[in-house]
Each structure stands twice: as C-alpha cells, then as structure tokens.
Image (cartoon, helix red, strand yellow):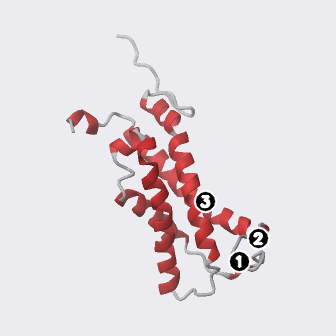
C-alpha cells in the first residue's frame, strides 16, 4: 500500500477516540440489553423468563468485558485504516468479533468461578453486540467524515487570522 493510506491528519486522534468510545459503548449496551431482553422475552431453548433480580445477584466483570471488546476488535484488524475507511468490507469481521468477545467473557467467568451466571446471556450478548457494532461502524461514517473535514458538531476550529 502507498504511504498516503497511512498518513495521519490533525484529527486522527479524535476520530480514533470517537470510534473506540462507540465500540465500548456498544459492548455495554449489548450487555445491559441482553439482561433486559432475557427478563422480558422467553427465548427458545430456555426455561421461561430470567428473574429480574438475577442482574443484582451476579458479579459483573465490566473491565474485562471492555478490554475483551477492544482487544478482539484490534486483533481482527478493525482499527486499521482500510477497516475504518471502508467498514462495509469488514462486516464479516465485525460479526465474528462479537462471539469471540463473548467467548473471552465466558472464560473470565469460568476462571473467576462465577458459575452461577446465566449462560443464555452470553448468546444474547453476542447477537446484540454484533448488531450494535455493525450499526455503529456503518452509522459513524458521516460523523468521522465530519471530523476529518475539520468540522465537528461540538467543536469548530477558529479560522486563522489574516496577516
């Protein structure tokens, strides 16, 4: 690839921070929505609804979940320049990242001996995380393009003063 692909303009840190924040928010929302969905919708292959108090009864590994989300996306190359500029070409990797992240989280719960955690949450988490990741990555293109142009909805650089 040419060096121009890897050239960084002044707003690359802002775009990267927005993208990572959205990815981590997608993981948190998917986790919370998995519990909400599981308590209100009887899913196939389950024994009815999950009691609402189960959310308060189990230990939640938030830092490990967020670290797993970022690490899986990084190792699948979804923070590379070509993945950021053409997210439609990498939808398969985004969909594969969610079950991998859920498997890492299963391992964390297993090795921490949190065996009372409802296992059906992991399946719902993977499906919701994949959906939210794809929606975020495809939907964030206009926002990232606006920051690339130098205009952002919360910050506008001041024009240089004439000499």
Viewer-side residue, 156 vs 64: 64
What distance separates the C-alpha of mark 2 from that of mark 3?
16 Å
Quarter of the N terminus within the rendering: top left
Instruction: Give left or right: position of 130 versus 8.
Output: right
**Can you say whether 18 is above or below 128 in the image?**
above
Q: Nearer the viewer, residue 99 or 147?
A: 99
Considering the numbered disc 3 on the image, is that residue within a helix, a strand or a loop?
helix
Quadrant containing the C terminus in the rendered view:
top left
> Marks 2 and 1: CB-CB under 8 Å?
yes
Q: Which residue is mark 2?
A: 42
Direction left: furthest residue: 2
Which residue is label 1 attached to? 46
**Residue pictured at 49% horizontal, 27% vertical:** 151
Q: Residue 116 vs residue 144: left or right?
A: right
Residue situated in front as seen by the camera: 95 or 81: 95
Crowding at label 3, few (<14), some or many (≥20) Cα neighbours within 10 Å?
Answer: many
Q: Earlier in the sequence, mark 3 or mark 1?
A: 1
Residue in the picture at 43% in, 27% down? 149
Residue 37 or 4: which is nearer the viewer? 37
The residue at the far top in this view is: 163
Helix, strand or loop under label 2: loop
Contact check, label 3 and label 1, Cβ < 8 Å: no
- The residue drawn where x is 40% and y is 63% is 71
Residue 25 seen in this snapshot: no
Give the label, 2 or 3, closer to the camera.
2
CA gap, disc 3 to disc 1?
A: 18 Å
Judging by the rendered image, the residue that carries numbered circle 3 is 128
């Amino acid at each position: 690839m040419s060096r121009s692909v890897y050239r960084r303009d002044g707003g690359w840190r802002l775009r990267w921070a927005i993208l990572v924040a959205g990815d981590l928010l997608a993981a948190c929302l998917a986790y919370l929505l998995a519990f909400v969905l599981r308590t209100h919708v009887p899913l196939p292959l389950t024994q009815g609804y999950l009691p609402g108090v189960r959310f308060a009864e189990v230990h939640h590994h938030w830092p490990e979940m967020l670290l797993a989300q970022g690490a899986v996306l990084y190792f699948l190359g979804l923070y590379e320049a070509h993945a950021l500029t053409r997210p439609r070409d990498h939808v398969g990797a985004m969909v594969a990242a969610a079950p991998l992240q859920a498997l890492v989280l299963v391992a964390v719960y297993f090795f921490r001996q949190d065996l009372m955690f409802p296992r059906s949450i992991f399946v719902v988490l993977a499906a919701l995380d994949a959906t939210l990741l794809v929606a975020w990555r495809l939907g964030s293109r206009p926002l990232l393009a606006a920051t690339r142009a130098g205009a952002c909805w919360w910050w506008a650089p001041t024009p240089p003063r004439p000499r």
